[in-house]
Each structure stands twice: as C-alpha cells, then as structure tokens.
Amino acid sequence: MPKNSNYGSLSAIFHLGKFSISTPIAASALTGYVLFANHLTVSAILPVTGVFFLASGASALNQVQEKLTDSKMERTRYRPLPIGKLTRFQAFLVALALILIGSALLLYGSRLLSLALGLITIIWYNGIYTPLKRVSAFAVFPGSMVGALPPLIGWTAAGGPIAEPMILSLAFFFFIVQVPHFWIILLRNSADYEKSGMPVLTKVFSEMQIRRLTMTWIIITALSSVLLTLGHAVYGFFPVSIVLILSVALIVLIRKFLFEEKTRRNINLAFASLNFYVLSMMILVILNNLL
C-alpha cells in the first residue's frame, strides 16, 4: 500500500480485499481439488475462484471491523479505511459483494458442502478469530483453523468425502503452518503490534522466547509435512524425498535466520523461506497427483 491516498477506487478495492493474499489461499483450494480429482480441467475454475472471492470478502470485512486498530499501526494505517478513501459502509458493501460473488461461484461450480465450508471459514475468521484477537495474545491457535478450510473446500468441490486421511493430512499441514507464519510477522513488526492496543505475545514473552517458540513450530511444521506422505497426499520415492529434503532445509534455514544474526533482513528471509516452503509443498502435491 503506498503511503498516500493517491490511488483510485479499483486500487482501493484491491487493497481492501487483499487480492495478493487471497491468491495463495485460492491456490491451497486448488491443491485440495487436484488431490482428489487427479486432473486439472476448467471445472476447477469456479470453486477456486469462489474461494478467492470469499477470502477477499473476509479480508475486506476484517478491515471494516479493525479500522481503529489499523489506524494505529504503521503497516496498516495507509489502508483504504484509515486514510478515508472508503467509508465503513462502502467497505462493507464491497465485502458483501465479494462474499456473494464467491458464494455464487461455489454454489454453481461445486456442492452445497463446499459452500457451507466457505461460509464457515468467513464466520470463523470474522466472527471468532477477529474478536478474539482483542482479548487474547494466543488467538492465532483457533485462528489457524482458517488456513485448514480452503483445501477442504477444494477437495469437496471435486467430489471428495470430508473425512479422508489424504485431505485431513493436507488440512492439518495448512493449520500448523499458520502459527509460525504469524509469529515471524510478529517478530518483524513487534513494536507496531504493540501500538495497536491489542494483547500481543511480546507482552507475554521476551523476543528470544518468541524466537524459540517460532523455531519449535517450524519443526512441528516440518514434521506435519511427513503426514502428507503417510496420508498419501504425496507418494513415490522421489516426491517423498523432496518433502524430506525441503523440510530439513527449512529447519536449517529458519534456525540460521532466527538466531545467528538478529536483524530485520534475516526475519524477512525467514518469512520468505517459510512461504517458499509452503508454495513448494502445494506444487509438489499438485504435480504428484497430476503426473
């Protein structure tokens, strides 16, 4: 977001809906879709696009809910609502439109179960996680459920039953990775989060303790990827070997970035490494089930 108000309405909607964040969420839904379907056709477009719009709508609604908090933080104070580019009511209408479009795409392109999971995701994110952030520094744990649901939406949209080990292993992986993902962001913006007035982990633990906790959850994330092989989301000697190599590399790199030189640059590298790891796992699952 540029640190001024010189952008148009379309740009305001783009930032309100956080399209850059909604894209990887939609990609996780695509991963779940391919995991069951074992093919990639135009039939995947509607449910995956539906997840994209639902995620954007939830993000827009979140900014309506957190306008005051966003105005206090450097990283968020230039969003459309704090700078007055959009009113709360206008932003709510945008959020509602995005959610309705996403719901229609899911309803038309998949199953009622997929739509129900999509709406549950919004209720969980905006109705439970967002208010909980105001009362607990540990809201990330229930909030991580939001990351587990998009792969399930994609899986069920392709016709899959909801309680299969294959998709549950993938959903669990996305659930676990949300925790270190958030804590690395917290390490990068700790002072900014403290300005928000919300309870944050930096008021409970020291920075070194948070780094150690983050490292612990990185190891748990790497171990959760092993479940992808046990659940047969990833199978075959070569793909499984890649999972193990990437997981070991993640642990080594994050340990280096978190503890060897405690600089903002290394925190950014840790964040990039984790994102690359998650992207690699999605690509690996998709290719393993397409080829």
Image (tube, rainbow, N blue to C red):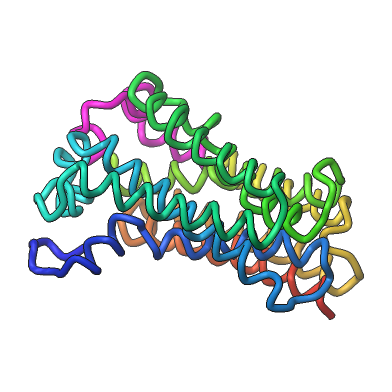
Residue 162, horizontal then vertical, whole percent: 80, 44
Q: In the orientation shown, which residue stands out farthest toward the right?
A: 236
- Please name whichever residue, 171 or 272, is drawn nearer the observer in this view of the structure: 171
Taking 116 as reference, is 201 above or below it? above
Q: Can residue 260 be seen in this view?
A: no
Q: Which residue is drawn at 42% across and 46% down?
A: 58
Residue 203, horizontal then vertical, whole percent: 31, 24
Q: In the orientation shown, which residue stands out farthest toward the top?
A: 135
Magenta stretch: includes residue 36: no
94 sits left or right of 253 in the view: left
Q: Residue at x 37, y 47 (%)?
A: 96
282 sits left or right of 232 in the view: left
Locate the C terminus and report the quarter of the image it occupies.
Answer: bottom right
- Please name whichever residue, 96 or 161, is drawn nearer the observer in this view of the structure: 96
Q: Residue at x 88, y 65 (%)?
A: 235
Q: Which residue is drawn at 29% across and 44% down?
A: 92
> Which segment did they paint magenta?
191-214
197 sits left or right of 237 in the view: left
Q: Can residue 125 be seen in this view?
A: yes
Magenta stretch: includes residue 202: yes
Taking 284 as reference, is 54 above or below it? above
Taking 161 as reference, is 159 above or below it? below
- The part of the image, by quadrant, that contains residue 288 is bottom right
